[in-house]
Amino acid sequence: MKIKSYLLLACLFVITLSACKKDKSIPAPQVEMGDSKKDVEGKLNEKLSFSASVKNGVAFQQEWKLDGEVKSTDSIYEFTPITSGIYLIEYTAFNNSGSFSFLYTINVEAPVIPVTPESSMYVTKLFEYNPAPGQFINKVPGNLISAEGILGKKGMVTLGAWGGNIILGFDHTVINGEKEDIIVYGNAMGNFAEPGIIWVMQDENNNGKPDDTWYEVAGSEFGKAGYKRNYSVTYTRPTPDTDPIPWKDSDGNTGFVATNTFHKQSYFPLWITGNEYTLTGSILPSSGIDMTNPSYITSAPFAWGYADNTAGGDKIDISNAVDKDGKKVSLKGIDFIKIQTALQANMGWLGELSTEVLGVADLSLVK
């Protein structure tokens, strides 16, 4: 029995050796790419065509991968980018003797709407007005008319308590220059600020809507103690409507947006159809608020980078925009801006801390 086993193993070894020698007799595919340039400039909604051909006529397999995902096994691959960004297209041809790979890097820039003589230095489009509850909500300056009042000019709109926000658009692309690019006008004073976090977006898919990626503009408090991202607060409609507004945050904390005797209307946005709604964003620390003297409450401004933070307006640098992981991004320009109340604070008789926006302008057009 042992002799038969040894003979069987010997035969298997010979067969395997023969197979290996046979595989080595077939050369690896020799490939010629239709376009030998590895870096390619693409345009939105314009088709790109890539091809490959094997010159030595051997049997082989091939595949095209887009950002690591197999998209085709043909000799030609066509790709139409629908959003801006960097795309990786890798071609591979292979058989048992070896393989050939070629990597294209496709750069598709977001389209730029140029400035014309008719362009406004101010934002001209209102996409969303999502205030948190507050003492001015449901009347001027906390209603839709007020939000529309800062289009093409200065006006005033309040965003309510933490998380309240407004989404606006320019009639042109604000180019990311060497210094500050945007100015947000508020009603801050030297000893009283109501800071708001700023978010920016470029129209990556060129459809004129703020449905691409929001990037937070990192201000002076980014990453410091008391700052938190991906934070949310749920506000609940009170009964009766004029009572304080209960809230609960994503950390399990609870509180109220307090009412006062100066403003007796409902503080809960009347256009909200449900009994509660949730706002999400980033929060800044309230450590700059000093209520030790109730008749003279102060709210110190942060160093830089926020709306309604310093008297005369706040200049914002697009270059400080960061992605969801907190890493800086390189934006050629932006088309949309979102401003969001950044603190959750009840300041007694003064009411809730609420970011006010008087206007938003492209600094390159401000005279």
Image (cartoon, rainbow, N blue to C red):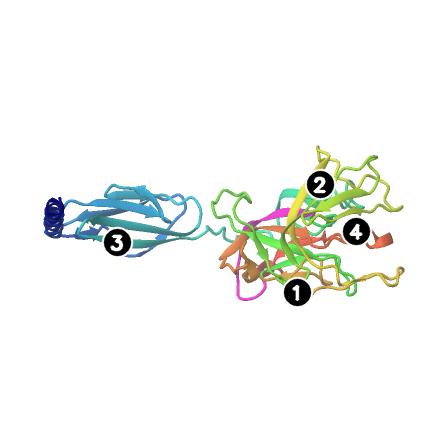
Find residue 101 and name its label: 3
Residue range (magenta): 164-180
Q: At numbered mark 4, what does the secondary structure look like: helix, strand or loop? A: loop
Point out the image quarter for the C terminus. bottom right
Mark 3: few, some, or many residues within 10 Å (few <14, many ≥20)? few
Question: Counting residues from the N terminus, which is met first, the one under dot 2 or under dot 4?
Answer: 2
Which residue type does callout 4 highlight? Glu
* Real-space Cα separation, disc 2 to disc 1, in angstroms: 29 Å
Which residue is situated farthest in the top direction here? 273
Please say whether residue 60 is visible from this viewpoint: yes
Residue identifier under label 1? 304
Question: Counting residues from the N terminus, which is met first, the one under dot 3 or under dot 4?
Answer: 3
In the image: residue 97, left or right of residue 279: left
Whether the residues at callouts 2 and 4 have beta carbons within 8 Å, the answer is no
* Real-space Cα separation, disc 3 to disc 1, in angstroms: 48 Å
Residue 54, image x and y in percent? 17, 48
Which residue type does callout 1 highlight? Trp
* Real-space Cα separation, disc 2 to disc 4, in angstroms: 20 Å
In the image: residue 197, left or right of residue 136: left
Which residue type does callout 2 highlight? Leu
* Real-space Cα separation, disc 4 to disc 1, in angstroms: 22 Å
